Image: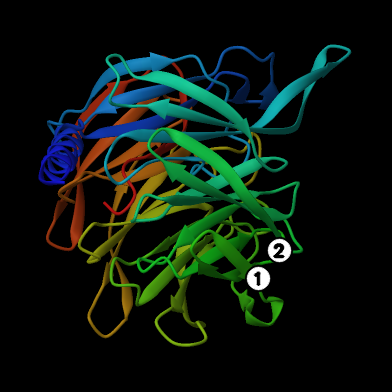
Amino acid sequence: MRRIGSFLTALLGLASAAAAEAPPFLLVGLDGKTFFLRDGGRNGANGHDAVAVVDVSDEARPRLAHLLPLDNSVYGPPTNLQITPDGRLGLVASSVVMRQEGEAWYAQADDRLHVIDLLADPPRLVETIRVGRQPSGLAIARTGDFALVANREGRSVTVLSIAGTSVRVMATVDVGDEAAAVAIAPDGRRAYVAKNKAAKVGILAIDGTHATYDPVLDLPVGPGIYGLDVTPDGRLALAANTGAEPSDGHADSISVIRADGKRPVVIDHLGIGDTPETLAISPDGRHAAVAVVRGSSAPAHAPGYTPTGAIALLTLDQSGAVRRTGEAEAGAVTQGIAFSPSGSHVYIGNYVDRTIGVYRIEGDTVRDTGYRLDLPGQPASMRGRAGQ
């Protein structure tokens, strides 16, 4: 028995060492089939997407570490991918593929989820599994043993178990409306679901890998909700509402949800500008960064058109108040946004420019460092490890 105990201790030590040595990666989904042009949007053929693995060991100067040719999409929110807390696995949902009718290409729902081994050298695809129809935003629990996937066309949330490199579908929960994104509370007992067209946030109660939905708890936020995140202490959740029509020139909002009570409630709405595509909360919970598209996804002749987007910084204080305290210019059609592991930097994906912009947090403001990482495709989504 003593030998078995020693052997198990050694195995646990090796697992801990592997987790500690997992590189500080970001995953970036590169869409190669949807284009925002000056005269309007256009879709193209499948087969040109990829997932970029970006090394942020030097937080001020990220570098491209590896590229995997895997389908994903800008259709749906830019939270369709995430890394497990130990850095071992990456999950990437493929929301849509294209079908051709005549000379035009149209999006149709996909149902695949890619599982990537990030400890392999180089990172490799482990398997691709089937989830719900049009899987969009996903979230991995801080325990690393389960994940949730929001299915837009499926109007549901898929519950996944994670054990080593094995990811399996455990259940699918009907939430009654399109589900565009999902965020899991730090204690793993509650999740928030972005019901984008219904302008509501739904609540899931979670017990292990069992989830239940009660429509009575739905929260009124704003139309076009795609961005959703929860503070590390679980006190607040933030929802980014893009409005009924993105890039229309009209101001949209961030909804603030008091999340630590028996029943979550919306306590505030902040004006944020035109089309807050998504948001991320810093590792210490002090700040939230918002990718604001403004009018950059509109045709150049549209009334709401602007050539660039922006990054907005929100400051969250101990009382639960949320204030907008900083802003900096970004590129065209800002999509995914993520903090660096230490929280000192923010990365934003500039879709049309095919770059990641690097920004530094200075007090309660945000500053453009001027560094841009060129990418071999259009960054549609971006995230690091769950819980960071």
Residue type pointed to by label 2: Val
Residue type at mark 1 is Tyr
| Mark seen at residue 326 | none
Residue at image position (33%, 24%) is: 53
Of residues 303 and 278, the one nearer the viewer is 278
Q: Is residue 307 visible?
A: no
How is the model colour-coded? rainbow
Q: As displayed, is residue 316 above or below residue 384?
A: below
Residue 95, above or below 137: above
Image position, residue 99 (x, y; %): 79, 20
* In the displayed structure image, the side of residue 39 where residue 385 appears, left or right: left
**Mark 1 vs 2, N-terminal side:** 2
Image marks 1 and 2: residues in contact by CB distance under 8 Å: yes
User: Residue at coordinates 38% horizontally, 46% vertically from top-left?
Assistant: 310
Given residues 177 and 210, the one toward you in this image is 210
Local packing at callout 2 (Cα closer than 10 Å; few below 14, some 14-19, many 20+) is many
Place of residue 192 in the rendered image (x, y in percent of width and height, measured from the top left)? 53, 66
Residue shown at 62% from the left, 24% from the top: 34
| SS at badge 2 | loop
Residue at the (18%, 51%) spot, across then down: 343
Density class for disc 1 (Cα within 10 Å; few <14, some 14-19, many ≥20) is: many
Residue 213's disc number:
1
Which residue lies under the disc numbered 2?
A: 175
What's the CA distance linking mark 1 and mark 2? Answer: 6 Å
Q: Is residue 148 left or right of residue 321?
A: right
Work out which residue is located at the far right of the displayed protein and give it.
102
In the rendered view, does 347 fall on the left or right side of 15? right
Expressed as whole percent of the image width and height from the top left, the position of residue 149 reads 57, 48
